[in-house]
Structures are given as C-alpha cells and as structure tokens.
Image (tube, helix red, strand yellow):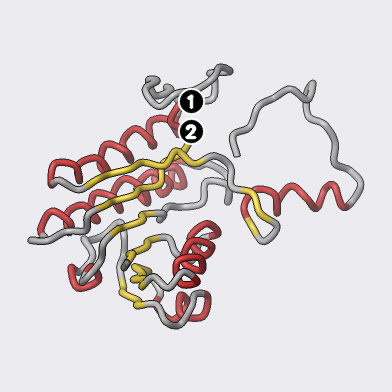
Amino acid sequence: MKVLVTGATGFAGKKLVSELVKRNHKVSILTRDIESARKRLPMNCEFHKWEPELYPPSSQAFDGVNAVVHLAGENIADGRWSESRKNKIKDSRVLSTRNLISTLKSMKNPPDTFVSASAVGFYGKDKPVELYEDLDPGKDFLADVCKEWEHEAFAARDHNIRTIALRIGIVLGYEGGAIKKMLPSFWAGVGGTLGDGNQWMSW
C-alpha cells in the first residue's frame, strides 16, 4: 500500500511514518522543507514540497497513493495564544485541509481513504461527561477550530472518498508530546497533584 502523510515531521507523524516503512508500505511526504524532512525521516520515502496554507499540493505527490493521512497543524502548546497565534492554529488546520481536498477533487482516480486529524477539543472544555462521536461541538476557540477543520475534511465524502476524522487526545511519549513538557518538574522534585486529583484528561 502507498500512503501520503502530511505533518510527517511532527511527533505523531514521525512515529506513523516509521511504522509504515517498517511494515513495507510506500510513503509519500508533503512538507514545507524537504531537506529538513529528509534528515528526520526514513530516506526511502518520497518528498514533495508544499506550503499548506497557501496552495493545493501537486497531484504528482499522489501518484499511486491508496490513502492520505493528514496530520499537519500548528502546535497548540508552543507559545501564548495571541490573536496572531490563534489565526495560525486555525489556518494551519482549516486552510491546509481545504487545499488538500482541492487536489483530491481534481483527480480522476483519487485515493480510496482520507484520514484527517482532529482533536478531543471538538467537545469543548466544559463537558465532564462521557463523550460520544455524535455529541454537538463545544463553544470555545478549539471547538470552533475542530468543527471547521472536520467540515473541510468531510468534503472529501462528496467525491466518494472514505473519510475519517481522528479526534486525538493529548499525545504522550518520552521523546515528545505533552509528557516531555511535564516530566522535568517531577525530575526536579517539584511535581505534584493538581486540584483534587480527579480531573480527567483524554490521552
């Protein structure tokens, strides 16, 4: 099988690409910086230049591709949420997905499956209940982003492409993600329980 991956140099993306290559799948990468991506990812991948918010990717990147996994998006945990940064968080998801779907729509034989990242932020931060796929979105900033993000992704269904939105929780791993930011305080002996210790966290 051949899989095209966006966001491949991110924490989850690198893990996915490594696993796909290990299982002898062919991998095509869309990236802003080909040279940087070559240094961080297996050399037997294909690399194609793409500025996600600016234009649709070249259809050449999709030659022989069976499935697309779209993980590109600005890291929400890096930096204060100024208005400029909130725009980057939104545009890196919504506009990149819109541009990606634009290319898929133009293809005579598009990939069979489109998997787009989304997030548990879809539900909002004020729902301390068991969550299901058919619940309405929340009403805060991240919920609005996820709602628009998924709306763009599901446009692929209009072209008979099987489409999946992954509402991903907090990503944990020693090499990166949230736990890498959490561990240093515990190693320094200043970690502890926040609140009453009963707060929930999807991961």
**Three-letter amino acid code at the position of disc 1:** Gly
Of residues 164 and 187, the one nearer the viewer is 164
Q: Name which quarter of the figure residue 193 lies in.
A: top right
The location of residue 26, given as percent across then percent down, is 36, 73
Quarter of the figure with the N terminus: bottom left
Measure the C-alpha gap from mark 1 to mark 2: 5 Å
Under tag 1, what secondary structure? loop
On the rendered structure, is 110 left or right of 61? left
Residue at numbered disc 1:
124
Q: Which quadrant of the structure image shows residue 109?
A: bottom left
Instruction: Indicate the position of residue 30 as horizontal and vertical percent values.
Output: 34, 68
Q: Looking at the picture, how far across and down is residue 150, in whole percent? A: 32, 38
- Please, is residue 38 above or below residue 156 in the view? below
Q: Which is nearer the eye, 11 or 139? A: 11
Along the viewing direction, whichever of 112 and 31 lies nearer the viewer: 112
Taking the spot 28% from the left edge, 51% from the top edge, the residue there is: 114
Residue behind mark 2: 121
Left or right: 103, with 78 as reference point: left
Residue 1 versus residue 111 in the image, above or below: below
Do callouts 1 and 2 mark residues in contact (Cβ within 8 Å)? yes
Q: Residue at x 36, y 54 (%)?
A: 70
Q: Amino acid at mark 2?
A: Gly
Residue 74 vertical placement versus 15 (above, below): above
